[in-house]
Image: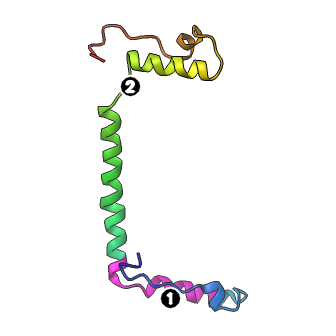
């Protein structure tokens, strides 16, 4: 934000340790209203472009990298052994195995 020109005043310190509520409110208003337009543009780009891009990237990665089949069974078995459960408990903890689901995993 400093790159975009954000300039902020510590209102609690500037108004005698925040004892004067009107001074603090006026200082906060000045902090908000006194910013250059580049700060608003920067925040809009971050909120409306950068964050949605990474959300879509995360969703795409989750969709294209599902864990199922033998790999999922191995994870359940590993978790069962980590928690001290007998190996047969892994089948109880996890969902039923899906046979013939068309995955070559």
Quarter of the C terminus within the rendering: top left
Whether label 1 touches label 2, CB < 8 Å: no
N-terminal label among 1 and 2: 1
Give the vertical position of 58 relative to 75 (above or below).
below
Disc 1: which residue: 30
Residue drawn at point x = 38 percent, y = 20 percent: 68
- The magenta segment is 23-39
Residue 75 relative to residue 24: left or right:
left
Residue drawn at point x = 56 percent, y = 11 percent: 92
Quarter of the N terminus within the rendering: bottom left
**SS class of the residue under badge 2?**
loop
Q: Position of residue 91 (x, y in %)?
A: 53, 11
Residue drawn at point x = 56 percent, y = 16 percent: 93
Residue drawn at point x = 62 percent, y = 11 percent: 86
| Colouring convention used in this rendered image of the protein | rainbow
| 1 vs 2, front mark | 2
Q: Where is residue 76 in the image (x, y as percent from the top left)?
A: 51, 19
In depth, the one of 48 and 60 nearer the eye is 60
Q: Is residue 24 magenta?
A: yes
Give the vertical position of 76 relative to 10 (above or below).
above
Q: Quadrant of residue 80?
A: top right
Residue count near mark 1 (Cα–Cα under 10 Å), binned few <14, some 14–19, many ≥20 = some
Q: In which quarter of the image is residue 89?
A: top right
Disc 2: which residue: 67
**SS class of the residue under badge 1?**
helix
């Amino acid at each position: 934000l400093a790159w975009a020109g954000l300039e902020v005043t510590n209102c609690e310190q500037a108004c005698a340790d925040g004892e004067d509520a009107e001074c603090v409110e006026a200082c906060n208003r000045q902090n908000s209203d006194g910013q250059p337009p580049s700060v608003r543009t920067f925040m809009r780009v971050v909120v409306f472009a950068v964050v949605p891009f990474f959300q879509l990237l995360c969703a795409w990665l989750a969709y294209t990298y599902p864990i199922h089949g033998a790999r999922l069974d191995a994870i359940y078995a590993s978790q069962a052994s980590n928690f001290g459960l007998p190996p047969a408990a892994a089948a109880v903890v996890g969902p039923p195995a899906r046979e013939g689901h068309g995955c070559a995993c």
